[in-house]
Amino acid sequence: MKKYTKLLTLAAAILTISAFSGCAKKSDSANGKQRTIRIATKGTAKPYITRDEAGNLGGYDTAVIKAVFERLPQYKPEFIINSDPLTGLLSGQFDVSYNNWSYNDKRSQSYFYSYPYDKIVYDFIQRKGDTPLTSFEDIANRGYVFESGAGFNVANAFEKWNEENPDKQIKIVYTESDILVQYQHIQDGVYDFRVDDHPMTKLYSETYDLSGLQFTQINDEVAASISKSLHSFFLFPKDEGGLKLRNEVNVVLKQLREDGTLDKLAIEYFGSTDQVPDLENYETPIN
């Protein structure tokens, strides 16, 4: 009888401890205990993402995502520099990634996209004095040679053009050379042109001697042939948790667009608001 009574007393004590523990967890949540959000980036997409000598992250993209989480106090952002953040998203290692990611259909099968926070503006880069390019057909008709790394949106777009236009081919030379070396190749007449986004060409032209080059902004119609969506996005795991976080981030991104915060950041980092997406892009997520 005594043994039975002791067992009942022990069981009651365990239930009491469990109940108290459960209440403590709920209380922590109710009291606003922050959940750490692991934000991963390669940290290499200059000028959108920069790193100082101490390894601190900066640039427009970093400023935007920091502004987002300042309005989501339930989360504590932890920034992580990683060479392969997208694989880390798939494995559950990270909660969100930013690296000036653009949209493509294949990637959308694995990740949720936020609303856009940056509009991509492309430039044709050519030798100074060359007649400015106007279209893919113009490139093919001139027989111009394009140097690029494999897998980039522009190279993919030219590959698609070549598949659809066997009589008007754009010549592509694949390389692992640094972008600055590729610019020098154009100046030296080794190759004929490149296509890069405007802030990148502006950064390189201000930092290095590229006096032998000219930069011509590409209109939206031609740019649409390069990328299905002319925007950059934050990416999230394609699971329930990723969807919840994406939707919360989207609410704040729309606020930042409406209240002028994105305009202020664009002027600070780019000198104009050309990079800010139109309000119509903040109604329905791209996937």
Image (spheres, rainbow, N blue to C red):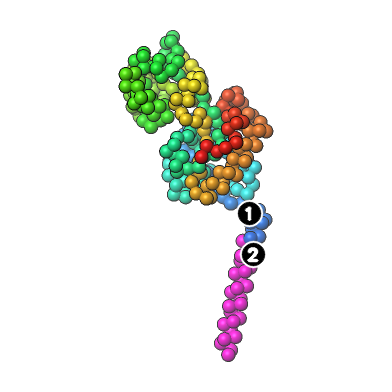
The answer to whether marks 1 and 2 mark residues whose Cβ atoms lie closer than 8 Å is no
Q: Is residue 31 visible?
A: yes
Mark 1 element type: loop
Q: Is 72 above or below relative to 153? A: below
Tell me the quarter of the image containing the N terminus: bottom right
Could you say where residue 34 lies in the image, as x and y percent from the top left? 61, 51
Residue at image location 48% in from the left, 23% down from the top? 223
Residue 17 in magenta stretch: yes
Quadrant in which residue 72 is drawn: top right
What x and y, as percent, mark residue 38?
A: 52, 47
Mark 1 or mark 2: whose residue is earlier in sequence: 2
Q: Which mark is residue 119?
A: none
Q: Predominant secondary structure in magenta?
A: helix
Q: Relative to residue 88, is residue 76 drawn left or right? A: right
Write the residue at 57% across / 37% down: 284
Residue plotted at (45% across, 15% down)? 134
Q: Tell me the distance, in whole angstroms, between the alpha carbons under discs 1 and 2.
A: 14 Å
Region rendered in magenta? 1-25
Q: Say if the magenta span includes residue 176.
A: no
Residue 263 percent location from the top left of the image = 63, 29
Identified by mark 1, the residue type is: Lys
Q: In this rendering, is residue 287 above or below 150?
A: below
What residue is pinned by disc 1?
33
**Furthest residue toward bottom:** 1
Query: From the viewer's perspective, is the residue at label 1 or at label 2 nearer?
Result: 2
Residue 23 badge: 2
